[in-house]
């Protein structure tokens, strides 16, 4: 006797938000195809959308860079990240089931991305 288990596909919407005219190095289709290729064996499918450019002044310390390191790395957002998130949430609906990727200019710290554990909001260089 053969036992077969089937699982329902998990659909995830990724919203890419360019901040202050930061551009994405790949197209929407390239990003979607690559994510779907990576997560296919986990039965996850991504729908990728690009939001309009979002202009926000997040530079609270005046250094011209997004602070990407807080007191507890990868457990919370920095004050400047919260400035972006709060400003975006004031003008847009943030859905808990979606993932949001804020594209920001390189802060010069060597990090390429930041997403606290168990959150749906991320920052990418």
Image (cartoon, helix red, strand yellow):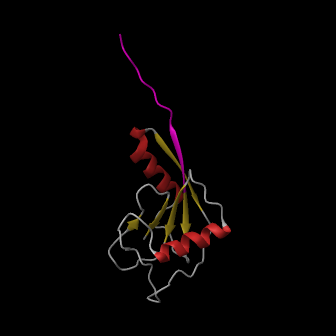
Q: Can you say whether 123 is above or below 107 in the image?
A: above
x and y, in percent, of residue 19 in the image:
54, 73
Check if residue 11 falls in the magenta segment.
yes
- The residue closer to the viewer here, 25 or 3, is 3
Assign the N terminus to one quadrant of the image.
top left
Of residue 109 and residue 116, the one placed in the foreground of this image is 116
Instruction: Report the residue at 56% width, 66% height from top.
Output: 17
Q: Is residue 42 left or right of residue 103?
A: left
Q: If the image is split into quadrants, where does the C terminus sit? A: bottom left
**Residue at point 40%, 66% (across, down):** 114
Does residue 53 appear in the picture of this structure? no
Counting every numbered tag in the picture gives 0
The residue drawn where x is 50% and y is 40% is 10
Extreme front residue here? 71
Quarter where residue 111 is shown: bottom left
Quarter assignment of residue 113 = bottom left
Magenta residue check for 117: no
Q: Position of residue 96 (x, y in %)?
A: 57, 53
Residue 34 in view in this figure: yes
Residue extending furthest toward the right: 91
- Please provide the residue range marked out in magenta: 1-14
Establish if 99 lies above or below 72: above
**Residue in view at x 36 percent, y 80 percent:** 108
From the viewer's perspective, tell me whether residue 13 is left or right of residue 76: right
Magenta portion: prevailing SS class: loop
Residue lying furthest bottom in this view?
62
Percent x, y for residue 52? 62, 68
């Amino acid at each position: 006797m053969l036992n077969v288990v089937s699982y329902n596909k998990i659909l995830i919407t990724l919203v890419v938000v360019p901040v202050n005219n930061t551009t994405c190095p790949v197209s929407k289709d390239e990003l979607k195809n690559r994510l779907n290729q990576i997560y296919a064996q986990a039965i996850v499918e991504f729908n990728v959308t690009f939001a309009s450019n979002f202009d926000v002044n997040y530079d609270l310390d005046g250094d011209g860079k997004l602070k990407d390191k807080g007191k507890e790395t990868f457990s919370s957002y920095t004050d400047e990240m919260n400035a972006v998130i709060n400003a975006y949430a004031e003008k847009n609906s943030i859905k808990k089931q979606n993932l949001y990727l804020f594209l920001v200019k390189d802060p010069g710290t060597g990090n390429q991305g930041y997403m606290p554990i168990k959150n749906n909001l991320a920052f990418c260089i």
